[in-house]
């Protein structure tokens, strides 16, 4: 399994994107109603970039929506297809890199969920992702994504090793404990996180989870100069207005007219 193309040693390591471990850790559904509403309002085909193992894609398919999921990780796609088959759902799960994938189809909604844009580290790659979105948006289509609202205080507190930050069992029953330690790289604007995996009491396995920080005004400018108009910006899945205390930056955009 390959990892995301690195920039100056940045990236995400294999165990973080192992579908079994991923599903054990990310079993929440609190954002799904937001996506169901957004996709229904789009009234047309939906494209999810970085669909992972289908945590959001599958509920949309189950609701009868026309959804295509794209991801670059083989284990994620295998898990998504297996789940879809088990539920009797038909949907396309395609292999592709969101920086360069090109499908022969336009979509009324394109979205990048769960902070996935934060694994894009260079300005060039961010602009490639935005170009991919523009290439797939149907006229009047909506672009949605979310990232964290960076908190220097929070990242500073994680400089010391925190043991047992995450504890869970995988769908296959393996017991997983994850320790976490962070170091903020100010020049790269990256929170360089190390997750130390302990699976079924086995040896410790350090894994990178580097997260590019996008600051609010910076992101507003990036969108503007890459051809998008911001229609709404929320601080949570309940659509609360974005503010300094918000943990999330949730954007609803449309391609700006030439």
Image (cartoon, rainbow, N blue to C red):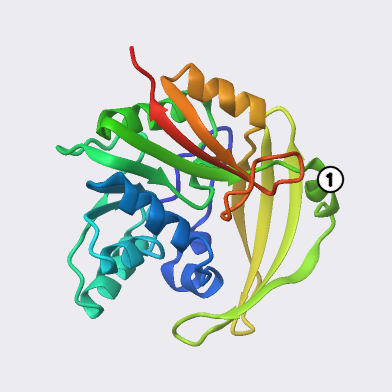
Image quarter for residue 206? bottom right
What residue appears at the point 44 percent right and 85 percent down from the top-left corner? 172
Q: Position of residue 257 (x, y in %)?
A: 34, 16
Residue 183 placement, left or right of 87? right
Q: Residue furthest bottom?
A: 173
What residue appears at the point 72 percent right and 39 percent down from the top-left corner? 243
Q: SS of the residue at dot 1?
A: helix
**54 is higher (above) or lower (below) than 249:** below
Work out whether residue 166 can be spotted: yes
Q: Position of residue 70 (x, y in %)?
A: 30, 50
Quarter of the rendering occupied by the C terminus: top left
Q: Residue furthest left?
A: 104
Quarter of the rendering occupied by the N terminus: bottom left
Q: Which residue is mark 1?
A: 153
Residue 228 placement, left or right of 233? left
Work out whether residue 71 can be spotted: no
What residue appears at the point 45 percent right and 66 percent down from the top-left corner? 18
What residue appears at the point 25 percent right and 68 percent down from the top-left corner? 81
Q: Residues within 10 Å of mark 1 (few under 14, many from 20)?
A: few
**255 is higher (above) or lower (below) than 248:** above
Residue 243 placement, left or right of 226? right
């Amino acid at each position: 399994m390959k990892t995301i193309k690195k920039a100056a040693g940045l990236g995400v390591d294999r165990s973080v994107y192992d579908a079994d471990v991923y599903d054990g850790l990310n079993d929440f559904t609190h954002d799904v109603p937001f996506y169901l509403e957004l996709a229904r309002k789009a009234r047309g085909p939906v494209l999810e970039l970085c669909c992972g193992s289908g945590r959001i894609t599958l509920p949309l398919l189950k609701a009868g929506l026309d959804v295509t999921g794209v991801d670059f990780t083989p284990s994620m796609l295998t898990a998504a297809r297996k789940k879809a088959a088990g539920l009797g759902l038909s949907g396309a799960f395609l292999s592709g890199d969101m920086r360069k994938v090109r499908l022969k189809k336009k979509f009324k909604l394109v979205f990048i969920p769960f902070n996935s844009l934060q694994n894009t580290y260079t300005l060039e790659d961010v602009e490639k992702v935005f170009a991919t979105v523009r290439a797939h948006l149907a006229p009047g289509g909506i672009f949605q994504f979310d990232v964290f609202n960076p908190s220097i205080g929070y990242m500073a507190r994680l400089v010391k090793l925190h043991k047992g930050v995450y504890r869970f069992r995988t769908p296959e029953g393996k017991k997983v404990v994850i320790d976490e330690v962070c170091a903020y790289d100010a020049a790269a604007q990256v929170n360089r996180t190390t997750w130390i995996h302990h699976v079924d009491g086995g040896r410790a396995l350090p894994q990178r989870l580097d997260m590019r920080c996008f600051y609010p005004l910076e992101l507003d400018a990036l969108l503007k100069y890459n051809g998008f108009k911001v229609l709404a910006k929320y601080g949570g899945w309940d659509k609360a207005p974005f503010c300094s205390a918000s943990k999330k930056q949730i954007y609803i955009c449309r391609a700006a007219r030439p």
